[in-house]
Image (cartoon, rainbow, N blue to C red):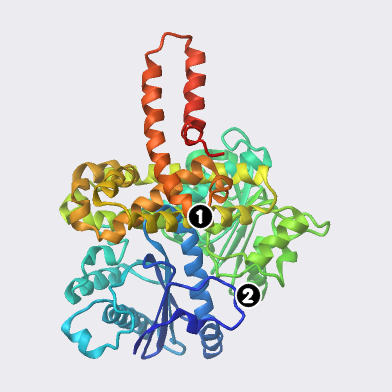
C-alpha cells in the first residue's frame, strides 16, 4: 500500500512547526515507512529501524513519523547550500524473533518494497496511471541516499529498479553507488566538515590552537563507524599527538583513558573495521579502562561515558536521536554545575534535543555546534553526486573519479569554513545560543533561496542563462569542465533554477551576514540579490584595474581587501 498524503493530515491541531512539502507512506509485510520532504525537489537518506523485541517495535512505531519529520527538517536546514531541499525516509521493520539470516532477508525485502512503492507514486506510466489515484497532478522529483543499515546491495538494486521503472535519472535516484558514487565512509566526507567546525570552535571559544596545543576529545560512535572512524583518522592526520581522545563509546562498549587512547590501536580498529570492544586492553594507560556491554556494569559505563568523562570537546559521531534530552541533560554537568565538556560538535543528527541544547547553554554556557551545520558535508557530497549522475556518463565519472573526489573534499572544507566563520562571528556580535545562530543562518539562506527561486520564474530565459555562472562556480571544476554545456539539456528546469537560487543565497549570507538579508523587504530581496551579482562583476573589474596601479604594495593590498570585503554591498547603496 502506497499513499501520497496531504502533509497537513499529519500535523496536530495547534502545532506551529513547519508543514512539510510532501509526505509519502508505505505499508508492507512486516514494515511501515514514511518519506518526508520540505521542498518540491529534495534529497535525504533512507534509514532502516529494526527494534529487537515487540515492545520496542511498538515504541518506535509511536514515534516513527516524528522521527522522520525531525530528521527531514534537520536535513532541510543543512541542505541550504545545495539545489535539493531536505528529506528523510524511515522504514520501521518488525524483525523481532527472527534469526540473523531471517532478519537480513526481511530488511532487504522491505527496502525493495519501499523503494518500489515510492516509484509507484512518482513515476508516471500507463500501469501506474491505471492503479494510482492522483490528487497532486504534477511530477515529483526525489533523490535518496543510504542511511543506517542500508547496504551496497540495496543501493545497486534501487538504481537498477529506478531505471527499469522509467525514472528520468536513475543514477541520481540513489547516492553512494559503489562504482559511480562517492562513498561517504570510504572518503570520510562528513567527518572532513565536522573537523573544520571543531577547529574553528577550539580557536574561537576555548582559545586553543589545535596545531600547536594539546586538546582532549570524547566521542560516541565506534571506530568502525563512518563519522567516528573517519574523524579519528582526520584528527590524528591533522593534529598528531596534540589530539588526545580520552573516551569512545559505541554499541559494544566503551574505552576510556585520561592520558588519551593509543593512536596506533585506534587506527588499527578503524583500518580493520572493528568496534571499540576489540580495543587491546594492554594498550591502555595506568588509569585506562575497557567496558563491554556483556555485563550490567559495562552497559552503565557505556551509557554514561559521554556524561562522565571530562574533555575539551564532546563529539557525538553516532548514537540514537534524543540521547540527551530535557529529562537528563543535567547529567552532562559536574557537581559544581560546570559542563563535563564546554564544547559539543554534533557529528550525529539530533543527538541532543533543541530544548536540552538551550538549557546546557543557559545553565552552563556550553557551546554547541548544531548538526545542521557540523555534519552538512555529507549532504553536499550527495548533491554533487546527483549533479555528476545527470551530467556525466558512468565512464566519464569513473575515469575522473579521484580528481572529482579531491575537488569535492576541498569544496566541503571551504563551505564548512565559510559557515563556521559566520557562525562564530554572529555568535560574538549578537544575542542567542550558537544553535540559535545556526538555525538563523539556515533559515535566512532558505528564505533567500525561496525568494530567488520564485523570481527566476519571472525572468527571461536569457537572464536566467546569464546567472548560470553561479551554478558553474558551485560545481567541482572537473565536472564543470567536462559537462557544464549539458546542464540545460540534462537537468530538470526546476533543478537548474533551484541551483542558481541556492548558490546566490549562500553567497549573499556567508559574505554579508544574516542581518543584511533580514533587513531587506521580502518583495525586494530577489532583485537586490540579482543586482548584487552585477555589482560583484563591477568590483572584479575595479580590482583588476587596481592591480596595475603604481602605488605601494601594502596600500594596494589594503584597498583590494576592502573592495573584496564590502565593495559589492557598498555599490548597491543598501545598508
**Left or right: 338, with 200 as reference point:** right
Q: Earlier in the sequence, mark 1 or mark 2?
A: 2
Nearer the observer, disc 1 or disc 2? 1
Of 361 and 77, nearer the camera is 77
Q: Quadrant of residue 24?
A: bottom left
Residue at image coords 42%, 47%: 527
The relative height of residue 3 versus residue 533 in the rendered view (above or below) is below
Q: Does the CB distance between marks 1 and 2 fall below 8 Å?
A: no
Of 54 and 564, nearer the camera is 564
User: How busy is the neighbourhood of tag 2: few (under 14 within 10 Å), some, or many (20 plus)?
Assistant: few
Q: Determine which residue is flagged by label 2.
A: 295
The relative height of residue 332 versus residue 10 in the rendered view (above or below) is above
Residue at image coords 22%, 65%: 169
Farthest-out residue, right: 336
User: How busy is the neighbourhood of tag 1: few (under 14 within 10 Å), some, or many (20 plus)?
Assistant: few
**Left or right: 268, with 55 as reference point:** left
Residue at image coords 29%, 79%: 137
Q: Is residue 254 visible?
A: yes
Q: Position of residue 41 (x, y in %)?
A: 35, 65
Residue at image coords 53%, 61%: 348
Q: Position of residue 501 (x, y in %)?
A: 38, 52
Of 328 and 39, nearer the camera is 39
Q: Determine which residue is flagged by label 1.
A: 522
Could you tell me which secondary element the residue under label 1 belongs to? helix
Could you tell me which secondary element the residue under label 2 belongs to? loop
The relative height of residue 393 versus residue 425 in the rendered view (above or below) is below
Q: CA distance from mark 1 to mark 2?
A: 59 Å
Q: Position of residue 225 (x, y in %)?
A: 46, 61
Q: Position of residue 261 (x, y in %)?
A: 59, 50
Q: Quadrant of the C terminus?
A: top right
Q: Quadrant of the N terminus?
A: bottom left
Amino acid at each position: 500500500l502506497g499513499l501520497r498524503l496531504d502533509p497537513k493530515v499529519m500535523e496536530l491541531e495547534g502545532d506551529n512547526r513547519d508543514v512539510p512539502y510532501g509526505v509519502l507512506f508505505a505499508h508492507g509485510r512486516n514494515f511501515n515507512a514514511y518519506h518526508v520532504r520540505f521542498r518540491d525537489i529534495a534529497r535525504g537518506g533512507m534509514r532502516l529501524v529494526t527494534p529487537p523485541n515487540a515492545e520496542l517495535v511498538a515504541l518506535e512505531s509511536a514515534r516513527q513519523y516524528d522521527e522522520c519529520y525531525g530528521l527531514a527538517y534537520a536535513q532541510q536546514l543543512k541542505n541550504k547550500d545545495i539545489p535539493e531541499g531536505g528529506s528523510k525516509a524511515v522504514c520501521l521493520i518488525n524483525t523481532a524473533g527472527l534469526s540473523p539470516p531471517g532478519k537480513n532477508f526481511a530488511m532487504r525485502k522491505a527496502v525493495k518494497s519501499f523503494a518500489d512503492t515510492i516509484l509507484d507514486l512518482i513515476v508516471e506510466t500507463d500501469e501506474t496511471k491505471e492503479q494510482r489515484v492522483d490528487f497532486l497532478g504534477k511530477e515529483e522529483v526525489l533523490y535518496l541516499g543510504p542511511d543506517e543499515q542500508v547496504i551496497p546491495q540495496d543501493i545497486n538494486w534501487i538504481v537498477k529498479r529506478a531505471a527499469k521503472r522509467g525514472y528520468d535519472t536513475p543514477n541520481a535516484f540513489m547516492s553512494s553507488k559503489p562504482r559511480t558514487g562517492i562513498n561517504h565512509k570510504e572518503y570520510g566526507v562528513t567527518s572532513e566538515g565536522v573537523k573544520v567546525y571543531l577547529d574553528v570552535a577550539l580557536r574561537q571559544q576555548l582559545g586553543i590552537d589545535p596545531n600547536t596545543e594539546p586538546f582532549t576529545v570524547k566521542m560516541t560512535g565506534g571506530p568502525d563507524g563512518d563519522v567516528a572512524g573517519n574523524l579519528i583518522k582526520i584528527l590524528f592526520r591533522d593534529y598528531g599527538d596534540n589530539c588526545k581522545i580520552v573516551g569512545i563509546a559505541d554499541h559494544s562498549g566503551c574505552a576510556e583513558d585520561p592520558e588519551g587512547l593509543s593512536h596506533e590501536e585506534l587506527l588499527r580498529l578503524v583500518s580493520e573495521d572493528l568496534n571499540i570492544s576489540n580495543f587491546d586492553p594492554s594498550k591502555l594507560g595506568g588509569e585506562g579502562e575497557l567496558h563491554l556491554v556483556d555485563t550490567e556494569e559495562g552497559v552503565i559505563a557505556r551509557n554514561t561515558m559521554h556524561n562522565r568523562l571530562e574533555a575539551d570537546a564532546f563529539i557525538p559521531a553516532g548514537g540514537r536521536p534524543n540521547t540527551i534530552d530535557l529529562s537528563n541533560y543535567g547529567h552532562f554537568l559536574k557537581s559544581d554545575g560546570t559542563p563535563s565538556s564546554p564544547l559539543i560538535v554534533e557529528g550525529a543528527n539530533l543527538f541532543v534535543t533543541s530544548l536540552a541544547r538551550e538549557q546546557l547553554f543557559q545553565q552552563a554556557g556550553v557551546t554547541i555546534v548544531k548538526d545542521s551545520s557540523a555534519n552538512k558535508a555529507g549532504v553536499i557530497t550527495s548533491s554533487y553526486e546527483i549533479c555528476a549522475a545527470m551530467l556525466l556518463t558512468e565512464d566519464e565519472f569513473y575515469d575522473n573519479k579521484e580528481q572529482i573526489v579531491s575537488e569535492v573534499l576541498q569544496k566541503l572544507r571551504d563551505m564548512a569554513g565559510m559557515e563556521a566563520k559566520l557562525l562564530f562571528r554572529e555568535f560574538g556580535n549578537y544575542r542567542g545560543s550558537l544553535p540559535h545562530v545556526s538555525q538563523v543562518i539556515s533559515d535566512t539562506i532558505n528564505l533567500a533561496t525561496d525568494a530567488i527561486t520564485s523570481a527566476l520564474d519571472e525572468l527571461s530565459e536569457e537572464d536566467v542563462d546569464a546567472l548560470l555562472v553561479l551554478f558553474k562556480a558551485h560545481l567541482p571544476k572537473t565536472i564543470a569542465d567536462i559537462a557544464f554545456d549539458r546542464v540545460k539539456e540534462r537537468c530538470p528546469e526546476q533543478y537548474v533554477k533551484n541551483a542558481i537560487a541556492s548558490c546566490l543565497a549562500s553567497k549573499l549570507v556567508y559574505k554579508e551576514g544574516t542581518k543584511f538579508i533580514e533587513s531587506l523587504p521580502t518583495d525586494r530581496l530577489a532583485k537586490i540579490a540579482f543586482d548584487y551579482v552585477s555589482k560583484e562583476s563591477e568590483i572584479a573589474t575595479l580590482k583588476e584595474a587596481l592591480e596595475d596601479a603604481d602605488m605601494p604594495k601594502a596600500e594596494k593590498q589594503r584597498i583590494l581587501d576592502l573592495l573584496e570585503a564590502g565593495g559589492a554591498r557598498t555599490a548597491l547603496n543598501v545598508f
